[in-house]
Amino acid sequence: MGDKSNSVPRGSVLYLSHGGGPLPLLGDGAHKEMITLLKKVTPDLGNPSAILVISAHWEENKPTITSGASPPLIYDYYGFPEESYAIEYPAPGAPMLANKIFGLLQSHGIDASLTDQRGFDHGLFVPLKIMYPDANIPCVQLSLVKGLRPDEHIRLGKALAGLLEENVLVIGSGFSFHNLRAFFGPSTMETQSMNEAFEQWLIDTCSNRQLSEPEREHRLVNWESAPAARYCHPREDHLLPLHVCYGIAGAPARQVFRFEIMGKKASAYLW
């Protein structure tokens, strides 16, 4: 392998649960554990030279990458206090990284697109404003692909595995539990049990070192067969950033974080 003592620091991959809209930035008590986690984990991520975010809040017909030098913010939420539409996070874009990602996807036979028009949605600026409040690290967003096929998103991640050889932090910004009705409905022993059952399955799938990587991938591709899968994810947009993260890492998560958001159990994973 050779001596890598003088090489660029290796990148990290983090799947996180980003909470409800802008609430983590508005002092909402139901997000306290999440905020504490994000602040705690950030020092373990080193000093990335750039950040790639795969956000649950952006879907395109093919993988699309933000390539603008100064992307604006997209306040893609509704019905929140006025101050939530004045949040600022003036992180620069990273056109060179965007082009590198585009090239990696193309070289793996994945048709992709660049856009210098789209801004950063709250799947990026909400967690990053907590983690890196100075907004001085260049950022790029990558879309999900319409159709939301889990195998397609793992393949997308595999094509980007080369990013780990650089000092790039990859963040899958989603939510391990994302049933909006359940957040505002009654919590019963049954709903708590379903939430817990899926979380246990997801933690085991992502971190169990006894699983082979083909087994782990098979479980993620067939995630709908997990306990209470469709209760926890009526639509899988908030789960699939994890599939991209796993595709990049190709290994069990080295750390698992458990916490509660808005009364529901959630988790985050670091590779």
Image: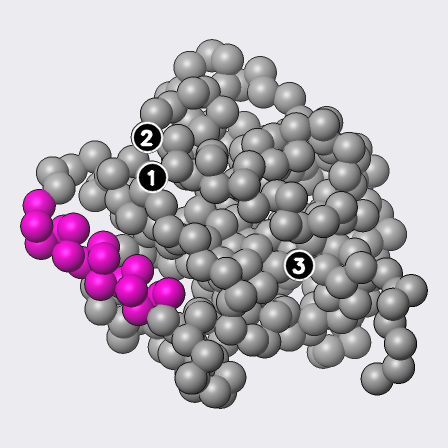
Using the rendered image of the protein, determine whether residue 167 is visible from the camera's viewpoint. Answer: yes
Q: Quadrant of residue 195?
A: bottom left
Q: Quadrant of residue 229?
A: bottom left
Q: Assign a secondary structure to mark 3.
A: strand
Name above or below for residue 35 compared with residue 110: above
Q: Residue at x 49, y 25 (%)?
A: 25
Give the residues drawn in magenta, as a range. Answer: 188-203
Q: Assign a secondary structure to mark 2.
A: helix
Q: Residue at x 50, y 13 (%)?
A: 83
Q: Are marks 1 and 2 in contact (CB under 8 Å)?
A: yes
Where is mark 1, residue-wise?
A: 261
Where in the figure is residue 6, as x and y percent of width and height? 91, 64
Identify the mark at residue 113; answer none if there is no mark: none
- Mark earlier in primary sequence (3, 1): 3
- Mark earlier in primary sequence (2, 3): 3
> Counting other residues with Cα less than 10 Å from the Cα at mark 2, is it few (<14), some (14-19), or many (20 or more)?
some
Residue type indicated by callout 1:
Ile
- Mark earlier in primary sequence (1, 2): 2
> Counting other residues with Cα less than 10 Å from the Cα at mark 3, is it few (<14), some (14-19), or many (20 or more)?
many
Where in the figure is residue 33, as x and y percent of width and height? 39, 37
Where in the figure is residue 44, as x and y percent of width and height? 63, 50
Check residue 192 for magenta coloring.
Answer: yes
Viewport quadrant of the N terminus: bottom right
The residue lying toward the viewer, choosing from 195 and 34, is: 34
Where is mark 3, residue-wise?
A: 12
